[in-house]
Amino acid sequence: MDTLSYKTISVNKETAQKEWVVIDATDQVVGRLCSKVAKLLRGKYKPTFTPHVDCGDNVIIINADKVVFTGKKETEKLYTRYTGYPGGQRFNTPAELRKHPYGSERIIKHAVKGMLPKGRLGRHLLDNLYVYNGTEHKHEAQKPKAIDINLYK
């Protein structure tokens, strides 16, 4: 019988084609930027996407301090953390976090972390994200290619 047979291609850690990409976050809305970054980290833009494998790209975000929030989120959104002591619940707004040395980087990492799968795979994927406040980064040896994040859905 002459029928076409198609095999589902499933990549593994060794056969995954991982690339390094640079994204400029200047004047990007935080949530929209981070959802696209999460898809890049996961590998969903690739035809060989496999749900249980790290087949995404390594993403470098520069100019993280120039991201914007829409509406009143800059002053009214609350980030909650807990010190571990009784009565140790602390609240910060994005405007307060930006005053800290790595505040803008924490804002982006927090947003991307919430959009990745929970568990070992999600924690491993978050290690492929590098966020920098300025235009300089230390990954020139990997020869990352600059992409326009607005071209992605």
Image (cartoon, rainbow, N blue to C red):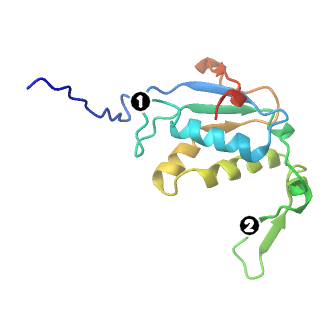
Against 136, residue 98 (above or below) is: below
Q: CA distance from mark 1 to mark 2?
A: 36 Å
Q: Residue at x 53, y 43 (%)?
A: 125
What residue did someone put label 1 on? 16
Residue 103 or residue 15, whichever sits in front:
15
Q: Quadrant of the C terminus?
A: top right
Instruction: From the image, state whether disc 1 or disc 2 is nearer to you.
Output: 1
Residue type at mark 2 is Arg
Single out the residue that lies furthest toward the bottom.
86
Query: Mark 1 or mark 2, which has the lower sequence index?
Result: 1
What residue did someone put label 2 on? 81
Report whether 82 appears left or right of 53: right
Report whether 37 appears left or right of 95: left
Residue 30 position, x and y percent, is 77, 45
Q: Quadrant of the N terminus?
A: top left
Q: Residue at x 57, y 32 (%)?
A: 58
Against 77, residue 34 (above or below) is: above
Disc 2, SS: strand
Q: Residue at x 63, y 55 (%)?
A: 114
Residue 70 position, x and y percent, is 86, 49
Against 86, residue 83 (above or below) is: above
Single out the residue that lies furthest toward the left.
1
Residue 84 position, x and y percent, is 69, 74
Report whether 47 appears left or right of 108: left
